[in-house]
Amino acid sequence: MAGQLRRRDRGGDTTLRALAEYYTAGLPVSWSGYHEGRAVPAKVALPTYAFQRKRYWLPSVTPRRGAARGGAAHHPLLGTEVACEGVAREFTAEFTVEELGALADFADGDRTTLPAGAYADLLLALQDAVHGHTRAAVPRAARRRPLTLQAETPRTLTTRLRPRPDGGADVTVLTVAEKTGEDEPRELVHASAVLTAGQDQQEPELTGLVAGPATLEIDAEDLYTDLASVGRPHGPRARALAVAARHQGGLVTAELECRGTTAVEQVPAELIEAALAAAVVLDPEGPVFLPREITSVRHFKKPRGARLNVVARVTTEQDRRLADILVLENGSPVLELGGVTLARPEGPAGQRQFLHRSEWVRRALPALAADTAPRHVLLLGRAEAPGTPGGDGLRVTPVADAAALKTALEDTSVTDVCWSWQPLPGAMSAALYRAECEHNYRDLLGLLTVLDAAAQQRPPRLWLVTEGAQKLPGDRPGDAALLGAATLWGFGRVLLTESPQYRATLVDIEPGGDLTALFDEVRAEAPGEFQVAHRTGARHVRRLLPGDAARTWPGGFALRTPGSGDLSDLSLAPVDDRAPAAGEVQVRVASVALTAEDARAALDGEESGEAGPVLGSLAAGTVVAAGAEAAFTAGDEVIRTPMTAPCAPPSPSPRPPWHSPPARRAARRGAAPRPSVWRRSARPCAPPPAAPAPRCGWTCPAARRRRPHRPASARTAPTSSPVASAASAWSPPASSSNWAHGT
């Protein structure tokens, strides 16, 4: 008996619960029979990403310092004023992250870092507690050491004021580190600012600023996906940013969703943080910049509406962003953040990383502009004729083959050509794979021949369409039936590079779906997007994101393959930084290329079971140090190339190149090794990066050393050469080939 009917059960809940218990016990239940004659509930798409883990332990009821105990309410981060010796004043609050409301949703795993918006809210609450108003600007608000909170762990936060001669006060927000050994506990400063005695209610500079048409727009789902990809996840309560747009002249506009304010809040911390994030969420380098300092924080009124607007003016200064931000409600100023300095986070999270990965991320299609020009599309490779959509500025003309395309291109109204991959029937096999690729590429190359022959001044944009050829988040494992279509994505990228006039754009649509998503892409013609995929109504674009891990050591590194020999999983390994010995030079590498020689070296490492070899048979760089009897001197521009000249017996050296592990493995296989040689460059290579930071894609830790600088991007190798006539060329031993250092 799964359940008993009760007289009070008018809606059938008991019956439904009993059926659910039968079903979970493994017994068959006819759900279609149950729902017969009832309204069919709407289906919702379940999340395809990992669910956010959150603890649900009941909060502690232990009384905490700074908490309200039946009296006046106090700000959770400010707490209450405590007695303090001397002229300073102190406010102390003790809390757990679970007691901070929406701030708890800024967690990354089980750790929560207090955002800059929380300190701004704290300073406004402090101003209200000290002066009884918030009508004065709070200058020089700076974020110092990050404050990280752990779940269910109480923390005590102290806000200290020291009076200034002008009537204001210096503010320090700090915590006290735990005592270790015999050392005295030390204070850790997390934020600082100045409270002024006067009032400042001048009209904000950005009031009444009218932004022009948006050049790029992003909605909440996409922008928070981008923030999570750079290590800044936001929980539901922290997501106050609804939409953001970038305009000409460095202007950014956004809309915020306000949940309302409590009695102790001036502006909720999540709203301030959302306004700060809006300034950089559409930055070309990604939303990696965090607020370091705010020149002036001015509060005008508490927000009361459900929707607020943000206007920001953002400029670039070297590797930082400077912003002036204004939050408005129905045109009236709420909060002004003037002179905000945003920079990359310190430590590995903020460094430019060497390794990157290609990922699909959500990105909504930009809205159509009012003056969008009509589009005329020639459609090839589709058996069915989609017809001509009406009233939307899009005309579609089916074309049978490349011969008919030549005639169709005579129509000067043609703006786009769409070509679809045609799979062949049958189970995938090597023969079918070859036949399918040959059939499609012959057809596609014929199309390109016709486009080249047309020699139009502005040729139509070429769209290459596949169905289910890309693996997107949430896709089920395939059965290899679309291997042929997947190769088009490699061909399309090459075509875009070598024939940019066609603006070749790859679009992957839902398997078995229609061309609605493709036509939407054609109408919008999103700038800069050349790899797009659609699944279940969601649009994805390809993005290059930083690698999963940054280097954890200072100094140089070598580029190696893992033990598997898989070149798609390269890794960085630390190397010793030493002065060149006799017959050796140290080279700062400017550029590196991976060749077939590196692929063979990687496979050699897999077969031998030894550690992965150092890669890079082609390189160029500058000699920065030379040992005694070296063939080069500091400042020489050199290139490293595989040696093709006949080899003479190796000259004596501490570690001859022929004794290297790759040479021994090649000898065991009966193949002659191909050592590499360094030669003087005929033309100057890229100059070595100058301190403090090179502009080559990642950060050089060695450039920040206090001791005399020796570049981390240097290679130490002997200058002796097995080439008889190579007075200016030398062959380094492969066993010490740590040349692939980088900055």
Image: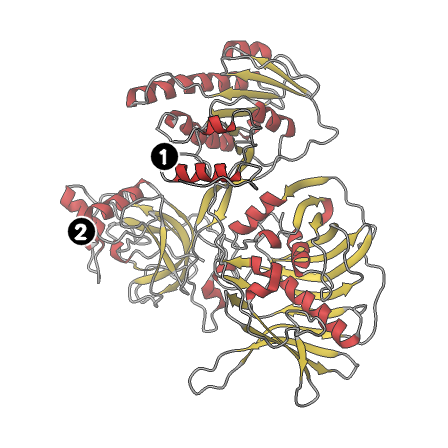
Residue 672 appears at what percent x and percent y? Answer: 19, 43
Judged from the image, the secondary structure of the residue bearing numbered disc 1 is: loop
Location of residue 711 with respect to 128 vertically, above or below: above
Q: Nearer the viewer, mark 1 or mark 2?
A: 1
Relative to 115, is 128 on the left or the right? right
Which residue is at a point 69% across and 85% down the rendered structure image?
Answer: 88
Quick check: 488 above or below 280? above
In the drawing, does residue 497 fall left or right of residue 215? left
Question: Which residue is at 48% across, 32% downward?
Answer: 493
Q: Quadrant of the N terminus?
A: top left
Q: Position of residue 519 (x, y in %)?
A: 60, 24
Q: Are marks 1 and 2 in contact (CB under 8 Å)?
A: no
- The secondary structure type at the circle numbered 2 is loop
For residue 649, the mark is 2
**Residue 204 spot, x, y in % from top left:** 82, 59
Does any portion of residue 50 appear in the rendered image?
yes
**Mark toward the start of the polypeptide (1 vs 2):** 1
Q: Is residue 306 above or below residue 529?
A: below
- Occupied quadrant, residue 391: top right
Placement of the C terminus among the 4 image quadrants: bottom left
Residue type at mark 1: give it: Leu
Task: Establish if 234 lies above or below 77.
Answer: above
Inspect this view and state whether residue 637 appears. no
Q: Is residue 440 left or right of residue 722?
A: right
Q: Which residue is mark 1?
A: 27
Marks 1 and 2 sit apart, C-alpha to C-alpha, by 80 Å
Taking depth in this image into account, of 308 and 633 the one nearest to the observer is: 308
Q: Amino acid at mark 2?
A: Pro
Give left or right: position of 250 versus 647.
Answer: right
* Crowd rating for badge 1 (residues with CA inside 10 Å; few <14, some 14–19, many 20+): few
